[in-house]
Image (cartoon, coloured by chain):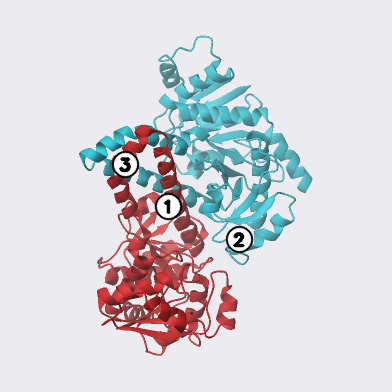
Chain colours: A cyan, B red
Amino acid sequence: MRIVVDAMGSDDHPTPDVEGAVLAAREFGETIVLVGDQSQIEAELAKHRTTGLAIEVQHASQQVTMTDKPSEVVKGKPDSSMHVGLQMVRDGKADAFVSAGNTGGILGIAMLRRIGVGRIPGVKRPAMGVVFPIETRPLLMDNGANADCKPDWLVQFALMSSLYVERVLEIENPRVALISNGEEEGKGNQLIKETIPLLQASGLNYVGNVEPKEFMHGEAHIGITDGFTGNIMMKTAEAIAGYMSNLIRDSLMANPLTIIGGLLARAAFAKVRGRLNPDEVGGAPLLGVNGVVIIAHGRSNAYAIKQAIGQARRMVEKEVVAAITEGMKAVS
Amino acid sequence: MRIVVDAMGSDDHPTPDVEGAVLAAREFGETIVLVGDQSQIEAELAKHRTTGLAIEVQHASQQVTMTDKPSEVVKGKPDSSMHVGLQMVRDGKADAFVSAGNTGGILGIAMLRRIGVGRIPGVKRPAMGVVFPIETRPLLMDNGANADCKPDWLVQFALMSSLYVERVLEIENPRVALISNGEEEGKGNQLIKETIPLLQASGLNYVGNVEPKEFMHGEAHIGITDGFTGNIMMKTAEAIAGYMSNLIRDSLMANPLTIIGGLLARAAFAKVRGRLNPDEVGGAPLLGVNGVVIIAHGRSNAYAIKQAIGQARRMVEKEVVAAITEGMKAVS
């Protein structure tokens, strides 16, 4: 298996991207192709012991920044690490693409067959899944690829994510719910109300609508939402978790007693942080494109990159793209 | 001033509702009218020392439950405590209405002048504001009254909430932002994109779009959103805060060292809980209806009810309804 890793992706690129690739090559024994500025990648690789590891470098002369607009990236940077990496997947020279770069850029390039991998036949809109970093590990989809959605797109999200969860997370017949502002009949916005009958008729394991709390408690394995709501929901969760962590840290510094208490309870806090750590869950799979594409957080460290590569590997092994291709044929 | 309190509102009614009314009568020295089942209210009042307090009882023969559908409440329970209480405000027999009951029911009744208070002339849709229970205390609006919104409704939400924040929270020229999935131009869903130019031309202190994290950090005093997104955002914040609190509590019980640490750091945790306590901030003002209406959480305890009554009192004192009425005239 050959997995392409965008060396120019993360906020601190190429350091965590290259180190993550080295860790992955060592742990998984697969070939990792680092794509990006060759001299920068080689300088970074020189810092690691890579003897015996299957690591290749593919030069790309351009680089996408976090502030580049997707439309400019797609047209204006044809030799970016994203273009070059995704084309390797399209042309069968690699099996998967992993990047911690500009999400809009990856989406824009990946969607188009001419410059990226293109869509799976029948897929109206590819979408991003993201595992909520809480104990029950539910998948939220769409996490931001499509700000405005139509009911039949949401049904496709449900189909694609069900196949992903079934194969990669090995949960049989996963429970699918719509994220809504209430579980009762009559709740939801127009989009939700129009999607309900379509999901009921879909043959998927649709269990109804869930509020955020019930979603986190594991009432569903998959929460379906438009990309705007999903993105706001994920960002709210991250913001509150960060806010509370800071508040607790600051409160513990208040007086000698709380400082000692905090030190004694250190193990407990480390455990809480570990449970909430988004690095553990890898990146967000972009489902519906004709290839394995994993989008990692811009703030990824080497460990998070390695986890995202491991996730790409499982998607290749479990043939998720082929499953979605078959799934789309079956419903069209 | 006379404030009507729905004695049949909260999940544990009439206990916290009546006790909150007693606390409010004592603290604020205003007349509180408890509306609901007379015998239940009187039995509850008998548990408190009410000598010298201005507390009245107004009987209402019907009661709205949390599972009643709004449409059924509006038509089917014409003598509910909500109907009777809101009509007292409409008819000038009271200055404000506070309820911790079924939100959909209150909204449905309050909107209609025939059975409730009706809208302020020119207001397309009343909406609920809610103070985010974090340090910066930003106001989020709409919190769930309108699942699907139009751009000009959002502009009205911005106008009404600006007047509320200016008067009740005493923040001059409050900063208004749209809640979005990114701050950059081009981000947002269709609703956000269409609202931007309207807000820019509104004369309000519109500072752009904010993501949840920046909203919580205080970049804006007011975050405007449709009621679906706002409700999901608030519920996600509550769910994550609850999840983390439980996780910390459980982790602290892991071993003797962490238990001792937790005991020593008790003051710190109490402080964190205090900061995040939604009871402090009172209830959600329903802005755009022709009277002061505060909707408190169903889980309100007596203290939360008392705070909500205090909030209603400030809205009356600061003449928020008159200000919105004038504001609507100025823009139409």
Q: How many marks?
A: 3
| Towards the viewer: A190 or A10 | A190
- The image shows residue B44 at horizontal and vertical percentages of 41, 76
Q: Residue at x 41, y 81 (%)?
A: B42
Relative to A147, residue A132 above or below: above
* Front position among marks 1 and 2: 2
> Do marks 1 and 3 share a subunit?
yes
Name the amino acid type tagged 2. Leu
Q: Chain of mark 2?
A: A
Name the amino acid type tagged 1. Glu
> Do marks 1 and 2 share a subunit?
no
Q: For label 3, count other residues whose C-alpha is less than 10 Å away and answer few (under 14), some (14-19) or many (20+).
A: some
- The image shows residue B33 at horizontal and vertical percentages of 37, 82
Q: Secondary structure at mark 3?
A: helix
Relative to B198, residue B234 above or below: above
Q: Secondary structure at mark 2?
A: helix
Q: CA distance from mark 2 to mark 3?
A: 48 Å
Q: Residue at x 58, y 63 (%)?
A: A188
Where's the N terminus of chain A, which quadrant?
Answer: top right
Q: Which residue is mark 3?
A: B263
Picture quadrant of residue A265? top left
Q: Which residue is mark 1?
A: B185
Relative to A326, residue B103 above or below: below
Q: Chain of mark 1?
A: B
- The image shows residue A300 at horizontal and vertical percentages of 44, 33
Check the image and name the residue furthest to the left. Answer: A256
Which badge, 1 or 3, comes first in the chain's sequence? 1
> Do marks 2 and 3 share a subunit?
no
